[in-house]
Image (spheres, helix red, strand yellow):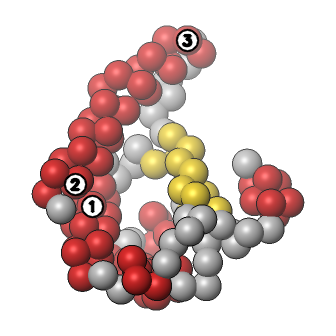
Amino acid sequence: PERLQSYMLAGSELQLRRRLPACSLAKGVVIDKSLNIMDLEGLSFRLVTHSTARKVLINYTTAIQNHYPEMMGKLIIINAPKVFSIAWSFVRPLLDDKTVAKISIFGADRAAYRRAL
């Protein structure tokens, strides 16, 4: 779990130090926020209820919110199965209202989430 969390945090650091500045240079304006798309197709009850997976998710969510709070412009979760509500029930209380307002959750309805993109 620690290696996975380190990998994910390294991605956030790379985005902060390289990707966003490169996008800013290419666009000619400061770009300091990102649009993140998370596809949950195939998410299973077994994974959602797995204690190690929950620990990684909680630790990563807390670290992102504490160390990179304003970097996420929007998070769009697509293909969220019904079982996702279990994961959301233990992640949601960890997030502040500002972060929750940036998150949109969609099921498998492509037309619905395409409008959000």
Q: Which of the two residues, 65 or 45, is positioned nearer the viewer here?
A: 45
Q: Give the label on residue 26, or none.
A: 3
Q: Give the label on residue 73, or none.
A: none
Q: Residue 12: x percent and y percent?
A: 32, 41
Q: Comparing marks 3 and 2, which lies closer to the viewer?
A: 2
Residue type at numbered disc 2 = Gln
Q: Comparing marks 2 and 1, which lies closer to the viewer?
A: 2
Q: Residue 25: x percent and y percent?
A: 49, 12
* Residue that protrudes farthest toward the left in the picture: 2
Residue type at numbered disc 3 = Ala
Q: Earlier in the sequence, mark 2 or mark 1?
A: 2
Q: Residue 66: x percent and y percent?
A: 24, 58
Q: Are marks 3 and 2 in contact (CB under 8 Å)?
A: no
Q: Which of the two residues, 89 or 44, is positioned nearer the viewer here?
A: 44
Q: Are marks 2 and 1 in contact (CB under 8 Å)?
A: yes
Q: Quadrant of the N terminus?
A: bottom left
Provide the residue designation for mark 2: 5
Q: Comparing marks 1 and 3, which lies closer to the viewer?
A: 1
Q: Residue 111: x percent and y percent?
A: 86, 60
Residue located 40% across and 83% down the image:
46
Horizontal relation, residue 16 to residue 79: left or right:
left
Q: Secondary structure at mark 1?
A: helix
Q: Secondary structure at mark 2?
A: helix
Q: Please, is residue 15 above or below residue 114 in the view? A: above
Residue located 59% across and 15% down the image:
27
Provide the residue designation for mark 1: 60
Q: Earlier in the sequence, mark 3 or mark 2?
A: 2
Instruction: Decide if residue 43 is in sight here.
Output: yes
Residue type at numbered disc 1 = Tyr
